[in-house]
Image (cartoon, helix red, strand yellow):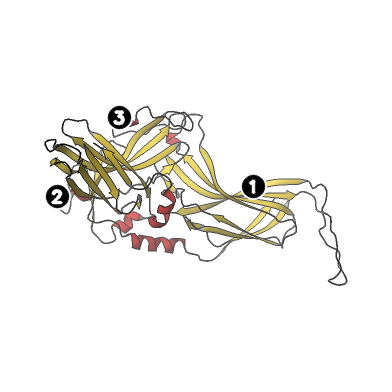
């Protein structure tokens, strides 16, 4: 009996283009007799991204890769609908161990290193489409069936990561025929394969992982506060007021702060509700006939009663566990703020009678009934990824600990 222990050195949260390291340990059981040697035929590892779509909502694109046998006939446990799964991108497998003999109690350790492939598909759990990243190890003990081990990964896509990858001038792109303008050797440890729409493999080469610190600095510059955004809100009943936002580009984990000013108005707002909503738009080429074009997912809300207020503030948290804005061949995820205002359709006076001194009190009774009308307004937002270390603590509760142990 042989135990295989795989442990990621920095958890399971990464950005595309970043370097990944995983320690792999093979330990032969000490309970075996001295003559019971175990021979490991091979251990290989690779990273891949799989896309799962619901048959009732999405038309499958051309699948250049054969669907893995374990994914066939997969069913969504929450809805009971059939899922079709195919591989979007994968790295070239690395052989870590070959023809290794272990005596009882003996241990063998090896380090697996790889660069997360650049892709337009981050980890995403949508209603119609899901993108799942995994680190897979194929292991075989001589005379036994091959065992496949998966470590789930959570991958984020940094904006303009291509420029970051090539900023040091050491990135090369190689076509499927193997030609290269720089050299004729393909560095195995830093290559990955992507499958284009024509069904051909394109191999990309990068001589080093992305500089995460530089990428996060550029992300800070992209999402920093600049001039406040001021929006005048009008409707068919008249002018409602002004909305001020510090910015419209945010990172995961940030707070959205807003301020309403109702001083310059000619229509009364009684209550408002603000919701952070993710729109999952299925691209027209992959949408089922008569299918739903998009679906909405509300992740946070805030509301306030503002009948007698001249100003009102709200704060909405952006959860760390959601997926940032992205666009792929099949689906596009957009984020927006939806404002719902409850307005009075008839004017009424809110003037409180004046008092002679501060010791006197006045009782004001609100109207028993107010005719109202509800209007809605959507404001698009851009949500970007953040530091993987910050996201790691959230996903520890979601089977993304980055370590597995199995018996071969």
> Residue 185 has which mark?
2
Q: Looking at the image, is mark 3 or mark 1 nearer the viewer?
A: 3
Left/right placement of residue 283 relative to residue 367 reads left
Q: Do the residues labelled 3 and 1 touch (CB within 8 Å)?
A: no
* Circle nearer the N terminus (2, 1): 2
The residue shown at (18%, 50%) is 187
* Circle nearer the N terminus (3, 1): 3
When asked about the image quadrant of residue 67, the answer is top left
How far across and down, in percent of the image, does residue 290 sit? 51, 29
When asked about the image quadrant of residue 351, the answer is bottom right
> Residue 69 has which mark?
3
Q: Is residue 342 above or below residue 294?
A: below
Figure quadrant of the C terminus? top left
The residue shown at (53%, 61%) is 247
Left/right placement of residue 275 relative to residue 54 reads right
> Residue 376 has which mark?
1
The residue shown at (62%, 49%) is 377
Q: Can residue 91 be seen in this view?
A: no
* Circle nearer the N terminus (2, 3): 3
Element marked by disc 3: helix
Give the spatial CA distance, label 2 vs label 1: 59 Å
Judge by depth and name the residue closer to the eye, 242 or 387.
Answer: 387
How far across and down, in percent of the image, does residue 178 sit? 17, 44
**Neighbour class for label 2 at 10 Å: few (<14), some, many (≥20)?**
few
Q: Can residue 58 be seen in this view?
A: yes
How far across and down, in percent of the image, does residue 139 sit? 22, 38
Element marked by disc 2: loop
Element marked by disc 1: strand
């Amino acid at each position: 009996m042989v135990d295989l222990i795989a442990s990621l050195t920095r958890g399971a949260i990464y950005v595309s283009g970043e370097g990944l390291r995983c320690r792999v340990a093979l330990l032969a059981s000490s309970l075996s007799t001295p003559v019971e040697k175990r021979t490991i035929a091979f251990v290989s590892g690779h990273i891949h991204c799989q896309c799962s779509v619901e048959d009732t909502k999405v038309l499958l694109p051309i699948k250049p890769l054969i669907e893995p046998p374990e994914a066939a006939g997969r069913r969504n446990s929450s809805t009971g609908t059939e899922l079709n799964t195919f591989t979007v991108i994968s790295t070239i497998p690395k052989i870590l161990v070959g023809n290794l003999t272990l005596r009882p109690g003996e241990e063998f350790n090896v380090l697996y290193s790889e660069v997360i492939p650049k892709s337009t598909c981050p980890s995403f759990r949508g209603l119609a489409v899901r993108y799942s990243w995994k680190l897979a190890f194929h292991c075989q003990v001589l005379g036994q069936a091959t065992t496949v081990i998966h470590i789930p990964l959570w991958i984020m896509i940094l904006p303009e990561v291509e420029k970051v990858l090539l900023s040091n001038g050491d990135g090369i792109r190689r076509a499927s025929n193997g030609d290269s303008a720089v050299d004729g050797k393909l560095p195995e440890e830093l290559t990955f394969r992507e499958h284009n729409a024509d069904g051909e493999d394109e191999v990309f080469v990068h001589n080093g992982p992305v500089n995460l610190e530089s990428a996060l600095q550029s992300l800070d510059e992209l999402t920093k506060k600049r001039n406040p955004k001021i929006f005048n809100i009008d409707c068919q009943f008249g002018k409602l007021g002004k909305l001020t936002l510090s910015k419209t580009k945010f990172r995961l984990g940030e707070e959205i702060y807003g301020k309403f000013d109702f001083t310059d108005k000619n229509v009364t707002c009684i209550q408002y509700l603000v919701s952070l909503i993710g729109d999952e738009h299925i691209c027209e080429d992959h949408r089922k006939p008569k299918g739903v074009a998009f679906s909405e997912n509300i992740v946070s809300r805030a509301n306030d009663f503002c009948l007698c207020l001249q100003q009102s503030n709200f704060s909405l948290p952006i959860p760390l566990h959601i997926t940032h804005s992205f666009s792929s061949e099949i689906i596009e995820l957009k984020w927006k703020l939806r404002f719902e205002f409850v307005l009075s359709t008839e004017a009424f006076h809110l003037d409180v009678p004046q008092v002679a001194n501060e010791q006197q009190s006045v009782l004001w009774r609100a109207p028993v009934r107010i005719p109202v009308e509800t209007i809605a307004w959507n404001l698009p937002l851009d949500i970007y990824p953040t530091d993987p270390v910050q996201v790691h603590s959230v996903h520890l509760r979601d089977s993304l600990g980055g370590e597995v142990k199995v018996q071969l």
